Image (tube, rainbow, N blue to C red):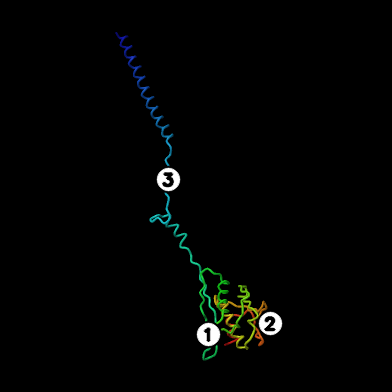
Amino acid sequence: MKRNELRHDYAWAKGLAWFLAGAVGVSLWWSMGASRTENRMPMVVSPPQLELPGTEGSTNSNQKSQVIGPVAKAARLSVETYWVETTGDGMVLMPKPIEIAAGLSKESALKLAFADLLSGPTDIGFSAIPTGTKLLDLETRPAGVYVNLSREFASGGGSASMIERVGQVIFTASSVDPNESVLIAVEGQLISQEYPLGGEGLVLDQPVSRSQYIVQYPL
């Protein structure tokens, strides 16, 4: 009887051991399977947030607008031509504003001013520059604005006329920058001691500025 009980207890213990081993194995299998499944799961990447230009409430858009800013407007030069006018005290040079398109270079703006100056009569005073005078060249140099005029500029008139026409050229050429000096040439020759202007022999110490002209040749 006891031997049979021992056999029964042994069988029962052996079955329990096999049951526990199987349970642990199943648990480990599920655990390892879940781990492998997690490792195989693809990583989900959120799509980038696109910011549309000008979108209100967008931080990136606001930052871009602050960096880029509004498109700068092209500078518009202020250019004038000068004309002789008679007053009770003598002659004066009167300015006439010239409309210049925005974005033009200084040289281009001054060439347009001289085209107006040499075109003839105006409603502001008169011109001492002889009819037919042409602008042969105009350029900005380190010494000042170089103005080369045709031979007609040196023809006719007395000393007063020579002084007045020179003043018209100096003031017109320096209308963009009133402190700038001017060099005046006739047919490529600078007016000087060797090449005086006209029959009166007007001599200029060049380059000459507005202030120097006023002191040397008061109207």
Q: Nearer the viewer, residue 129 or 207?
A: 129
Q: Residues within 10 Å of mark 1 (few under 14, many from 20)?
A: some
> Residue under circle 3?
47
Q: Residue furthest bottom?
A: 88
- Residue shown at 37%/27% (left/top)? 27
Q: Residues within 10 Å of mark 2 (few under 14, many from 20)?
A: some
- Residue shown at 53%/85% (left/top)? 125
In the picture shown, does residue 201 fall above or below 142? below
The kind of residue on which mark 3 rests is: Pro
Q: Position of residue 197 (x, y in %)?
A: 65, 84
Q: Nearer the viewer, residue 20 or 86?
A: 86
> Residue under circle 2?
195
Who comes first in sequence, dot 1 or dot 3? 3
Mark 1 vs mark 3, CA separation in Å: 74 Å
Of tags 2 and 3, which is closer to the observer? 2
> Residue under circle 1?
125
Q: Are marks 2 and 1 in contact (CB under 8 Å)?
A: no
Q: What kind of element bears circle 2?
A: loop
Who comes first in sequence, dot 2 or dot 1? 1
Q: Quarter of the image for the C terminus: give it.
A: bottom right
Q: Quarter of the image for the N terminus: give it.
A: top left
